[in-house]
Image (cartoon, helix red, strand yellow):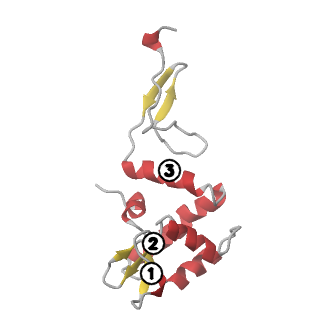
Amino acid sequence: MSKKNAPVKPNKTRAWYSYESGTAAGWEVVGVFGYKYLELSDIDVNIYEIRSELSLHFNEIEKNILFDKIFPFILRERDKNRYVEMEDLLKKIGEFSFDLSAKEIVGILLDYSLVVYMNSSGELFFNYRENNIEKSSNRLYVTLPKGVYHYYNKLH
């Protein structure tokens, strides 16, 4: 095969298309030697990376529960202008079968800032910036950060 017909290799910012996961994350095989780049939004790429990182703690079924059940639950409540309290989130996670406890799961989600604290004024508090946020005197709720929120509500 000549260099002219050789497939283009993805660079570090692109990933291979995965038929198993159903995510179009970069390159798709076209024919025997060809590849076609599939355009993705930055949000989709970030979610792909987040799912990959969560593999350290969760199996594929548990990750699907998080992305198909837990995060949409928080989103629906937010869209109804309701606040999700920590107890609500723990109860919702408890409805599903996970290897970890609900508190451990919430701890992981908070550590990765996939779920963040919010006060009644709408201010967000990320664990990596705040010390002892749980001991705050303000009433805190949980919500999704913008990167996860816009995965479900696409920007136009």
Q: Is residue 154 left or right of residue 28?
A: left
Which residue is identified by label 1? 133
Q: How many marks?
A: 3
Residue 130's image quarter?
Answer: bottom left
Residue furthest front as drawn: 131
> To which residue does mark 2 refer?
127
Q: Amino acid at mark 3?
A: Glu
**Mark 1 secondary-structure assignment:** helix
Residue 83: x, y in percent?
42, 82
Closest to the observer, 75 or 119: 119
Residue 27, image x, y percentages? 47, 33
Looking at the image, do the residues carrying marks 3 and 2 touch, with CB atoms under 8 Å apart?
A: no
Return the residue nearer the eye: 76 or 39: 39
Res 154 quadrant in image: bottom left
Cβ atoms under marks 3 and 1 closer than 8 Å: no
Q: Where is 61 relative to 22, above or below?
A: below
Nearer to us: label 3 or label 1: 1
Callout 2 secondary element: loop
Disc 3 designates what residue?
A: 49
- On screen, residue 69 versus residue 148, left or right, reads right
Badge 3 marks a residue whose secondary structure is helix
Q: Amino acid at mark 2?
A: Asn
Specify few, some or many for label 1: CA neighbours under 10 Å numbering under 14, 14-19, or 20 or more: some
Q: Quadrant of the C terminus?
A: bottom left
